[in-house]
Image: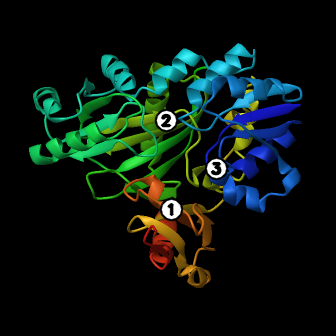
Amino acid sequence: MTIAALESLSFGLGRMAEAAAESGHRLCLLTGDRSVYRHELAVLPPEALDVVDVDTDDREAVRRALTALPSLAGLINTTDTWSVPAAELAAELGLPGPDPEAVRLLRDKRRVREALHARGLSRSTAVAVEPGPEGAEAVLRTVGLPAVLKDSAGTSSRGVWIVHDEEALHRALAEAGQQPLKGGLFAESFLAGPLYSAETLSWEGTTRLLGVLSRQTSRSAVVREEVAAFPVALPDGERDGIEAWVGQVLEVAGHRRGFAHVEFILTAEGPELVEINRRIGGALVGEVLCRTLGTNVYTAMMDEALGRRPRLLDTPLDGQGPAYGFVLVYADRPGVLKGWHGLGELAAFPGSVEWYPVREPGEALAHVGDQRGCTGMVLAEAPTAELAQHRAWSAAVRVRPVIADTP
């Protein structure tokens, strides 16, 4: 029998294929662009999974591809972009899956913020804003400064601006007016404190906190993720408080089953939501979860796809493996990637350092201000997340993408 994946995160296919096989099924990836998975497909044996090339933006083409699969038992999705189509197609085909309306709510960051504010789980609400100069007055009157402007359906940190003064506000609104937003622009209060993400698994109202990931972003007004480490060492009482809080947040947001990647700011008054992604964390988050927790967490994804309570909810997980840190290596300017300097130096650094390429030589990089400019990631391990982050950073600064001008 087959478990289909409607697109996927760039990393994790190997773990997913193993988990599907363990459940007695075969994984089949439906994709419109195999190059997104070049690293995984290059290291996996050809027989590890099936790949079907289809225009995944064409709903009817995807439905035909799914119905042609042998003994289709489940449909999974680990992306934000295809989460709603995947939920709707699962319902149409009679497969287990989340409530499509709940998924639509989670894809609208403004509606989530409004729902949490109404239930007392967010100190501020969200305010719809018109891109361009006319939006400034609404932000200043209802939210104030500093503030955050967001695309309500944005992904990969695109369409996010942090504004601390009126000049920055007008500049961000002008940029937003020139970009194709996936949803609508809205404003919310700026949250002061360090950024983290809660990596969780839920089933019918029960939520388990698998761990907390630290996150470092760029200092520029446009947010770009730079560094992450797992698991953050928190006092028992604080960890329990975050687990209780994130369970309430997910319940109000309508997320009742599956992984969630919940970004939050740990303010002086406690955790405050940044956004919810109803999936396992991106980049190398899934891989470090597997290594640190000592189990293939993707088995929970297969259990969910088959409509059964994930065994991971009840599996003992404490103290299984080392901590990990990873650094995203960006191009410093647009152009054509020719390769990298410094990869040969990584073996000299402590922490069993590994290189995960995201791009390949010859690719044109048009954007470097967000995750689209990431060329690869450096991963390192250590006894603690703090040490792992230091090791990954020290190694990553030696890796320098070589960029040539676009012809």
Q: Residue at 25% across / 44% down in the picture?
A: 175
Q: Seen in the image, is 153 located left or right of residue 349?
A: left
**In front: label 1 or label 2:** 1
Q: Nearer the viewer, residue 76 or 34?
A: 34
Q: Callout 2: helix, strand or loop? A: helix
The numbered mark, 1 or 2, whose residue comes first in the sequence reads 2
Which residue, given by chain and number where applicable, does mark 3 sit on?
Answer: 318
Q: Residue at 74% across / 56% down in the picture?
A: 41
Q: Callout 3: helix, strand or loop? A: loop
- Eyeballing the image, is 323 above or below 264? below
Three-letter amino acid code of the residue under disc 1: Ala
Q: Are marks 1 and 3 in contact (CB under 8 Å)?
A: no
Q: Residue at 50% across / 21% down in the picture?
A: 104
Distance from disc 1 to disc 2, alpha carbons, whole Å, reads 42 Å
Q: According to the image, what is the colour scheme of the structure?
A: rainbow
Label 3 Cα crowd, 10 Å radius (few <14 / some 14-19 / many 20+): few
Q: Seen in the image, is 69 located left or right of residue 163?
A: right
Residue 81 lies, in percent from the top left, at 54, 35
Please identify the quadrant where the N terminus is shown: top right
Which residue, given by chain and number where applicable, does mark 1 sit on?
Answer: 364
Which residue, given by chain and number where applicable, does mark 2 sit on?
Answer: 243
The image quarter in which residue 92 lies: top right
Residue 114 lies, in percent from the top left, at 33, 21
Three-letter amino acid code of the residue under disc 3: Asp
Three-letter amino acid code of the residue under disc 2: Glu
Q: Are marks 3 and 2 in contact (CB under 8 Å)?
A: no
**In front: label 1 or label 3:** 1
Q: Is there any visible trace of residue 311 in the rendered image?
A: no
